[in-house]
């Protein structure tokens, strides 16, 4: 890069920093609601265009193997450089590099133009990049214009579903392999915490996940103003209620001839609600307060 080009690039970045400083100096309380709302929309588009420029430059750095050149170092990969310099997580760094390669070094030329032109958000570009990575390049090229048009109308989750249908039609065998891999990733993990709660984590296949959502939805609706305002709390209560109903219904498979049940250890004072009751324990999680023990006792058929 000659000195004139370098000076131009420095001036461009300096002007950008000055513009951001100008925005930071705004007194937002003096803006009308209409102006403020419009500015939020415009800024979001500019952020996407700026991130598009960043991805384009990242693609060039990756293509040249220039990661680490800013500090005169050689690094193992572009993603590792991003992690070190920008304190990104491994997943985020890899996703940025994969998106940059697909959009600016791969077949997604229409996506690149739409992103740089402000017609497409970075979130949409990321969905297109990740969703077409396993498709034959010719299929991606032929379908890209239609996909970009869809991206201009749909939100990222719905665009992801469109790509899922495309993959099923374009490469059924690859779709079957992906389904099997997804099947192998399923799992549910339950672990007691130090304070006696139970941490729940897991991955469900689409049909299992949607079945769970459908079962929880009616149980998670606010019954009145006293219900927890947090959706996550209502879903936690709904999951507990779903399990309670399954246990009480008597339709679960028996184990060793015995129906599934909770074993609660509680003293008589706790069960009767007497003063100074200490509560009890259930399974490997506890202790339970006296009120929780009484609720479980009331659920016994």
Image: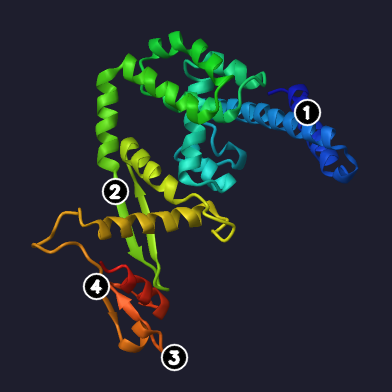
Q: Secondary structure at mark 2?
A: strand
Q: Residue at x 83, y 37 (%)?
A: 33
**Residue 95 in the image, given as x and y percentages of width and height:** 48, 35
- Which residue position is annotated with label 2? 187
- Which residue position is annotated with label 1? 12
Q: Secondary structure at mark 3?
A: loop
For marks 3 and 1, give the CA distance.
74 Å
Reading the chain from its start, which is encountered first: label 2 or label 3?
A: 2
| Closer to the eye: label 4 or 2 | 4
Structural crowding at the residue carrying mark 3, measured as other residues with C-alpha within 10 Å and reported as few (<14), some (14–19) or many (≥20):
few
The image quadrant of residue 206 is: top left
Q: Secondary structure at mark 1?
A: helix
Describe residue 160's horizontal placement relative to residue 186 as left or right.
right
Q: Is residue 1 above or below residue 273?
A: above
Reading the chain from its start, which is encountered first: label 3 or label 1?
A: 1
Q: Nearer the viewer, residue 128 or 94?
A: 128
């Amino acid at each position: 890069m000659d000195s004139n080009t370098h000076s131009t690039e420095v001036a461009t970045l300096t002007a950008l920093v000055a513009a951001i400083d100008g925005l930071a100096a705004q007194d937002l309380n003096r803006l009308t609601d209409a102006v403020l709302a419009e500015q939020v929309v415009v800024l979001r588009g500019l952020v996407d265009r700026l991130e598009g420029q960043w991805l384009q430059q990242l693609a060039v750095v990756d293509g040249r193997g220039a990661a680490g050149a800013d500090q005169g170092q050689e690094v193992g990969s572009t993603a590792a450089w991003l992690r070190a310099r920008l304190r990104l997580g491994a997943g985020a760094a890899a996703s940025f590099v994969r998106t940059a390669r697909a959009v600016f070094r791969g077949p997604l030329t229409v996506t690149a133009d739409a992103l740089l032109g402000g017609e497409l958000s970075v979130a949409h570009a990321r969905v297109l990049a990740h969703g077409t990575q396993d498709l034959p390049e010719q299929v991606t090229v032929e379908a890209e214009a239609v996909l970009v048009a869809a991206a201009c109308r749909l939100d990222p989750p719905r665009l992801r579903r469109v790509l899922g249908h495309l993959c099923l039609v374009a490469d059924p065998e690859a779709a079957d392999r992906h389904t099997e891999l997804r099947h192998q990733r399923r799992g549910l993990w339950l672990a007691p915490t130090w304070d006696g709660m139970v941490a729940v984590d897991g991955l469900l296949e689409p049909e299992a996940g949607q079945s769970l959502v459908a079962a929880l939805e009616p149980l998670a609706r606010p019954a009145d103003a006293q219900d927890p305002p947090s959706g996550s709390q209502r879903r936690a209560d709904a999951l507990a209620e779903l399990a309670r109903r399954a246990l009480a219904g008597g339709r679960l498979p028996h184990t060793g001839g015995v129906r599934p049940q909770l074993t609660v250890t509680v003293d008589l004072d706790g069960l009767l609600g007497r003063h100074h009751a200490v509560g009890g324990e259930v399974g490997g999680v506890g202790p339970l307060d006296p009120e929780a023990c009484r609720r479980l006792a009331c659920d016994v058929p």
